[in-house]
Amino acid sequence: MSRVLREYRMRFERVPPGQAAVDLDALGQRSKLGGLPDWDQDDETPACPICGEVMTFVAQLDSIEHQSRTNPHSVDALSGKQDYMFADVGMIYVFACLEHSQVAAVLQSG
């Protein structure tokens, strides 16, 4: 059986035009839906395996338990209890081909 991770509730809020959804310096707090990906490294946007077109960016999931005094979900890095630490404060990027119902994810280390 796969491991069951601690649950977090997400609250969605529309971002007004001209504003950024996240503060890129706020490690652990950079998760978002839509817009453009905030790559930790180089652009790795995948192509649809069916049509070959570039996939649409859907979301990015940050390492939300990154240990920081300013992160409300901070978990002590030495506790062994960080469920949501992707590589070194990395990010998971989610993409979809909306025409062919294909999805892909990319993991980048911070």
Image (tube, grey):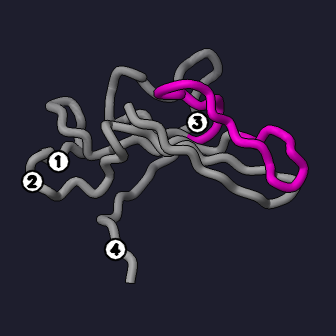
Label pair 3/4, CB-CB below 8 angstroms: no
Q: Secondary structure at mark 1?
A: loop
Label pair 1/4, CB-CB below 8 angstroms: no
> Magenta-highlighted stretch: main secondary structure?
loop
- Residue at the spot 33% in from the left edge and 44% down from the top edge: 64
Q: How many marks?
A: 4
Q: Nearer the viewer, residue 66 or 45?
A: 45
Task: Identify the residue position indicated by label 2 in the image.
Answer: 79
Marks 3 and 4, the one that precedes in the sequence: 4
Q: Secondary structure at mark 2?
A: loop
Give the distance between the C-alpha atoms of the residues marked 3 and 2, in whole angstroms.
Answer: 35 Å
Task: Identify the residue position indicated by label 4 in the image.
Answer: 3
Task: Identify the residue position indicated by label 3 in the image.
Answer: 14
Residue 8 bears which disc, if any?
A: none
Task: Identify the residue position indicated by label 1 in the image.
Answer: 75
Q: Select label 3 or label 4 by which is in front.
A: 4
Label pair 1/2, CB-CB below 8 angstroms: yes
In the rendered image of this protein, does residue 110 appear above or below residue 100? above
Marks 3 and 2, the one that precedes in the sequence: 3
